[in-house]
Image (cartoon, rainbow, N blue to C red):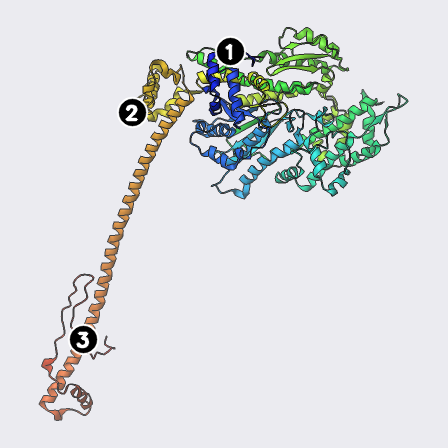
C-alpha cells in the first residue's frame, strides 16, 4: 500500500534528510518540504526518538503512543500553561492545544457553536487515554473558581465527570492481544457548558457493547476488567459472600493470574461512591456479577433419551445454586429455563427438551442479557447523576472515543460493526475536510489544484448501501425463521455484491467468508454464526424469570419494559440498531465544529519507545495524513463570511464607509488586509500576487491562513487595548476630578464648621464678659461707697459694715478709687484663630457671678 520505504529518494528528499538533528523541531508537518510519506515518517520518528509525542499535521493532531507513563506531560501546571497562553497555536503541539482551541471556539465566535473532538486510530493507539486527558482538562479549566458554588454543585459535577471514566472502563474495557485497556464499546461524551462556559453537567451515549466477551474470550485475551478487579481486590468477607475462595477458577475468567494496572478494585468502588451509588446498591451489583461468573461454571451432559432434557453435571449443581442465590431467582426455575424451552402453538404452550448445545446457548444468553442490562442501567445512572437541566446549559463540547480498527485471525459480526464505525468516522473526515474544503475553494472562485485522496464511499456502500448491502442481506437472513446456512449466504453475497470492488473472496478457502477492503486494510470475515448474532434472540422464559428476581437491582433493570422482551425474538436486529445509533451520532458531528486527533500505534507489541516504520506508515496512509498536510499547507483553513468579517474587524478602519454591493465589500476587506500587513511590517516582504498565499476573497467568504488570522487578531487586540487604555484614562480622569471636587467640598465644609465653632465660642465669651462686667461694676460701686464714707466720716460707718471695711483696708492700707482701672467695654476678636483681647479685673472674683 502506498510508497515503499525502499524507494529511492529524489535530491530534495535527500537534502531534507541530511540535517536529521533538526527534524524533531518540526512542530507542524506542513513545514516539511517536500511532503511525502517518507519525509513525514522520518520527521515523526525523529520526534518520537526525542520523546516528543505530539505533532501538528495541519488541522489534525498526530499523537504517537509512548506505551509508558509520562506524568509531567499532563500535570496541572501544563494544563494552566496551555489555558492561559494568548496564542495556543504558538505553543508546542499537545492534546491540550486541541482542547483549548475547541473551548475558545465555543465562546470566541459571534454565535457560539458546539464543538466535537474526534479521537480516532486503531486499537491500542491511545484513544482512551487521550479522551481521559481531554475530560480531565475540561474538568480543570472549565471549573468554577471565583463563582460561589451552591451546595458544592460544581465540585460535584467535576468529580463525577472524572469518576465516570474509571467506572465505565471497568465495565466496558478489556485486555486484548493488541491493547491491555481496549474499549469494547463506543462512547460520545457531551460536556455541558453554561453561558459563562463553566462546566455544569455531562451526558454519555454508548454504542454496541461487546457483550459476547462475557461468555467468550479469544485466546490470550481477558474478560471485562470488573471481574478481575473483584477477584484481586475483594476483602475476605466479600469473597466469602460471593463464594469466591482463593484459588477458585471460573471458566469465563481466562488469564486471571495476569495482573494489570487496570485491576484496581478500590478505584472503581471509590468512583461508585462519588457518583452516589450507595453501599447496598453496590452490594447488589457485585452479587449479580458473581452470579454471572458462577453461571459460566454450569455444565450439562447429554441425556441417553432424546425425549428427555439434558442432565446437569453433578459438580455444576453447586454453581447453579450459587448463581440462583446471587441473581435472586429460584434454582429449579433457573435449571428448567436452561433445559426446557416453551413453544407456543396458538393459545397453547408446548414444552420441548433442549439439546446440549441449546442448553449452553441459553446459559450464555442469560449471562449476556444480564450484563448488557446492568451496563445500560449503569450508563443511565451516570447520566442522571451528571446531566444538567436543559435550561442551565447552552453549549457543549463532545468527546468521541470509539473502538479502533480491528483485524484478527477470526473476525465476525463484532469486528464488522467496529470497522464499519471507523469507516463512518473516516468518511466524516473525508467529507468535512478533504472533500468539502476543496469543493468550497472551487465554488468560491479560488485558484486551486485539486488534491487526490482516498475516498471510502465504495466500502460504505458495500456495508450499508441500499438496496443491496452486507447489512441488508444479513437482516433478511436473520429474519428467516430457520437456521442460517453460511455457505448459501456466501453465495448470495457473491451474486448480489460482486460488482463492488471493496469485496472479494478466497475461492480456495474451506470456511465461508468474505473479504472487505477497508480504508485501513483488508479484513476477512467469517460468515458462520453471523446471522445468529445479528438476531440476538432472548428466550421469553429467561426474561419472565428475571422479572421475578428478588435482587432489587436486577428486578429494576428488567421491569422497565416488560412487554417487549416477552415477545422473544425482536424484529430489530443488531446491525439495524447499531446503524441507526451511528446515523444519529453523525448528525451530531455534522452539527458541530470537529477537531481531529489521529492516534498512531508505533508498534504492534506495545513496547515502550519503539518505533517501527513499516507499521506506522501504513497507519499514516490509511488515515490520509499526507493528503491532510497537502491541503492544510496549500489551503485556507479559516473561512469567514463577509458580514462576520466586517463585524469583527471593522474597528481596524472605522473611518471607511461600506455601501451595499459585493465590490465595495471586497475593497473594504482588501483595505483592512493591506493595513494590517503594513502595520505588522509584512507588506514589504510580499510581492505581487503572493498576498493571495495569505488571504483570498471569494464570492461570499474571506479565506485566510492561520498566520493571517493571527495577524488580524493581533491587530484587533492592539486596537482593543488602545480603546481600553483610552477608557481607563477617561475613567481615571473622572475619578481624579471626583476626588478633587470632594476634597474642595470637604474644605468648604470644614471652613464653615470652623467659622461656626468660632462664632459659637465668641458668643460664649461675650456672655461671660457681660457677667464679668456686671460683677466688676457691683464691686466698683461698693468700693466707691466705702471710700466716700471713709473720707467723709468714719463715725458714720454702721456696725454691720465695719467688718467688711476693715478687711479691705487691711489688705490695701487705704482705698483709692482713682487707682482702680476701668473695665474694658469693647471686645475685639481678630480672626477665627486669634484669642480675645481684654483686661481682666483684679484677682478676687465671685465664682457664683460667673
1 vs 3, front mark? 1
Q: Position of residue 372 (x, y in %)?
A: 69, 28
Which residue is most to the bottom?
795
Q: Is residue 437 visible?
A: no
Q: What kind of element bears circle 2?
A: loop
Q: Find out whether the residues at labels 1 and 2 contact each other: C-beta distance under 8 Å.
A: no
Looking at the image, can residue 450 be seen? yes
- Mark 1 secondary-structure assignment: loop
Q: CA distance from mark 1 to mark 2?
A: 45 Å
* Of the image marks 1 and 3, the number of the one nearer the N terminus: 1
Mark 1 and 3 residues: CB-CB less than 8 Å, in contact?
no
Q: In the picture shown, does residue 330 fall above or below 763?
A: above
Please provide percent x and percent y for residue 228.
70, 33
The one nearer the camera, 731 or 417, is: 417
Q: Are marks 2 and 3 in contact (CB under 8 Å)?
A: no
- Vertically, is 165 above or below 646? below
Q: Secondary structure at mark 3?
A: helix
The image's mark for residue 655 is 2
Q: Considering only order in the chain, which callout, 2 or 1, is on the residue closer to the N terminus?
A: 1
Apparent side of residue 402 relative to residue 326 in the rendered image (left or right): left
Q: Residues within 10 Å of mark 2 (few under 14, many from 20)?
A: few
Q: CA distance from mark 1 to mark 3?
A: 122 Å
**Label 1: which residue?**
452
* Residue in view at x 39 percent, y 18 percent: 695
Closer to us: 721 or 253: 253
Task: Report the mark closest to the observer, 2 or 3.
Answer: 2
Tell me the tag on residue 774.
3
Residue placed at 74% from the left, 26% from the top?
215
Amino acid at each position: 500500500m502506498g510508497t515503499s520505504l525502499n524507494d529511492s529518494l529524489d535530491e530534495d528528499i535527500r537534502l531534507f534528510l541530511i540535517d536529521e538533528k533538526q527534524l524533531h523541531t518540526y512542530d507542524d508537518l506542513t513545514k516539511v518540504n517536500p511532503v511525502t510519506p517518507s519525509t513525514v515518517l522520518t520527521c515523526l520518528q525523529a520526534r518520537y526518538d526525542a520523546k516528543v509525542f505530539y505533532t501538528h499535521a495541519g488541522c489534525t493532531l498526530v499523537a504517537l503512543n509512548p506505551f509508558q507513563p509520562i506524568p509531567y506531560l499532563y500535570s496541572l501546571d501544563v494544563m494552566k500553561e496551555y489555558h492561559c497562553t494568548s496564542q495556543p497555536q504558538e505553543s508546542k503541539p499537545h492534546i491540550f492545544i486541541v482542547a483549548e482551541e475547541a473551548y475558545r471556539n465555543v465562546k470566541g465566535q459571534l454565535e457560539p457553536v458546539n464543538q466535537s473532538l474526534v479521537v480516532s486510530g486503531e486499537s491500542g493507539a491511545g484513544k482512551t487515554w487521550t479522551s481521559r486527558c481531554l475530560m480531565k482538562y475540561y474538568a480543570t479549566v472549565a471549573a468554577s473558581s471565583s463563582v460561589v458554588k451552591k451546595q458544592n454543585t460544581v465540585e460535584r459535577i467535576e468529580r463525577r465527570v472524572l469518576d465516570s471514566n474509571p467506572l465505565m472502563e471497568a465495565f466496558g474495557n478489556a485486555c486484548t492481544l493488541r491493547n491491555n485497556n481496549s474499549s469494547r464499546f463506543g462512547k460520545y461524551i457531551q460536556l455541558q457548558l453554561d453561558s459563562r462556559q463553566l462546566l455544569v453537567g455531562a451526558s454519555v451515549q454508548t454504542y454496541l457493547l461487546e457483550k459476547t466477551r462475557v461468555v467468550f474470550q479469544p485466546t490470550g485475551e481477558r474478560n471485562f476488567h470488573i471481574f478481575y478487579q473483584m477477584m484481586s481486590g475483594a476483602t475476605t468477607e466479600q469473597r466469602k459472600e460471593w463464594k469466591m475462595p482463593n484459588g477458585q477458577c471460573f471458566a469465563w475468567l481466562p488469564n486471571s493470574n495476569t495482573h494489570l494496572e487496570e485491576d484496581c478494585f478500590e478505584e472503581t468502588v471509590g468512583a461508585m461512591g462519588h457518583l452516589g451509588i450507595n453501599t447496598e446498591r453496590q452490594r447488589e451489583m457485585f452479587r449479580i456479577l458473581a452470579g454471572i461468573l458462577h453461571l459460566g461454571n454450569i455444565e450439562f451432559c447429554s441425556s441417553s433419551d432424546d425425549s428427555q432434557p439434558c442432565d446437569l453435571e453433578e459438580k455444576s449443581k453447586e454453581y447453579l445454586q450459587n448463581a440462583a442465590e446471587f441473581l435472586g431467582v429460584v434454582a429449579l426455575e433457573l435449571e428448567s429455563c436452561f433445559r426446557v424451552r416453551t413453544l407456543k402453538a396458538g393459545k397453547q404452550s408446548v414444552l420441548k427438551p433442549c439439546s446440549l448445545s441449546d442448553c449452553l446457548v441459553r446459559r450464555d444468553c442469560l449471562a449476556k442479557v444480564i450484563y448488557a442490562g446492568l451496563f445500560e442501567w449503569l450508563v443511565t445512572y451516570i447520566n442522571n447523576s451528571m446531566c444538567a437541566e436543559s435550561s442551565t446549559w447552552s453549549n457543549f463540547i463532545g468527546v468521541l472515543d470509539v473502538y479502533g480498527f480491528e483485524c484478527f485471525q477470526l473476525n465476525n459480526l463484532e469486528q464488522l460493526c467496529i470497522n464499519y464505525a471507523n469507516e463512518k468516522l473516516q468518511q466524516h473526515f473525508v467529507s468535512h475536510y478533504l472533500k468539502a474544503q476543496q469543493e468550497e475553494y472551487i465554488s468560491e472562485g479560488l485558484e486551486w489544484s485539486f488534491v487526490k485522496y482516498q475516498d471510502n464511499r465504495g466500502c460504505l456502500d458495500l456495508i450499508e448501501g441500499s438496496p443491496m448491502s452486507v447489512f441488508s442481506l444479513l437482516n433478511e437472513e436473520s429474519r428467516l425463521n430457520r437456521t442460517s446456512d453460511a455457505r448459501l449466504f456466501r453465495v448470495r453475497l457473491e451474486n448480489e455484491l460482486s460488482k463492488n470492488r471493496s469485496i472479494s473472496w478466497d475461492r480456495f478457502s474451506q470456511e465461508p467468508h468474505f473479504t472487505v477492503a477497508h480504508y485501513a486494510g483488508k479484513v476477512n470475515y467469517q460468515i458462520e454464526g453471523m446471522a445468529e448474532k445479528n438476531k440476538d434472540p432472548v428466550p421469553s422464559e429467561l426474561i419472565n424469570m428475571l422479572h421475578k428476581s428478588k435482587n432489587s437491582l436486577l428486578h429494576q433493570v428488567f421491569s422497565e419494559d416488560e412487554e417487549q422482551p416477552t415477545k422473544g425474538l425482536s424484529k430489530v436486529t443488531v446491525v439495524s440498531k447499531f446503524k441507526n445509533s451511528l446515523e444519529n451520532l453523525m448528525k451530531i458531528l455534522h452539527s458541530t465544529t470537529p477537531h481531529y486527533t489521529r492516534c498512531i500505534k508505533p508498534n504492534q507489541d506495545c513496547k515502550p519507545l519503539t518505533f517501527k516504520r513499516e507499521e506506522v506508515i501504513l497507519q499514516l496512509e490509511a488515515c490520509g495524513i499526507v493528503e491532510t498536510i497537502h491541503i492544510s499547507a496549500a489551503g485556507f483553513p479559516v473561512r469567514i463570511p463577509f458580514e462576520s468579517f466586517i463585524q469583527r474587524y471593522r474597528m481596524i478602519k472605522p473611518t471607511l464607509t461600506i455601501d451595499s454591493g459585493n465590490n465595495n465589500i471586497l475593497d473594504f476587506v482588501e483595505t483592512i488586509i493591506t493595513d494590517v500587513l503594513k502595520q505588522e511590517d509584512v507588506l514589504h516582504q510580499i510581492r505581487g500576487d503572493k498576498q493571495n498565499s495569505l488571504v483570498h476573497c471569494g464570492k461570499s467568504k474571506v479565506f485566510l491562513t492561520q498566520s493571517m488570522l493571527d495577524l488580524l487578531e493581533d491587530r484587533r487586540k492592539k486596537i482593543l487595548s488602545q480603546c481600553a487604555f483610552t477608557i481607563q484614562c477617561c475613567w481615571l480622569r473622572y475619578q481624579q476630578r471626583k476626588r478633587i471636587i470632594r476634597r474642595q467640598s470637604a474644605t468648604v465644609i470644614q471652613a464653615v464648621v470652623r467659622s461656626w465653632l468660632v462664632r459659637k465660642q465668641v458668643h460664649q465669651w461675650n456672655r461671660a464678659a457681660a457677667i464679668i462686667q456686671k460683677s466688676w461694676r457691683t464691686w466698683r460701686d461698693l468700693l466707691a461707697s466705702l471710700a466716700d464714707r471713709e473720707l467723709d466720716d468714719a463715725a458714720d460707718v454702721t456696725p454691720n459694715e465695719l467688718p467688711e471695711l476693715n478687711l479691705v483696708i487691711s489688705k490695701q492700707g487705704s482705698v483709692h478709687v482713682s487707682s482702680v482701672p476701668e473695665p474694658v467695654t469693647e471686645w475685639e476678636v481678630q480672626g477665627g484663630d486669634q484669642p480675645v483681647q481684654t483686661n481682666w479685673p483684679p484677682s478676687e472674683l465671685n465664682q457664683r457671678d460667673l
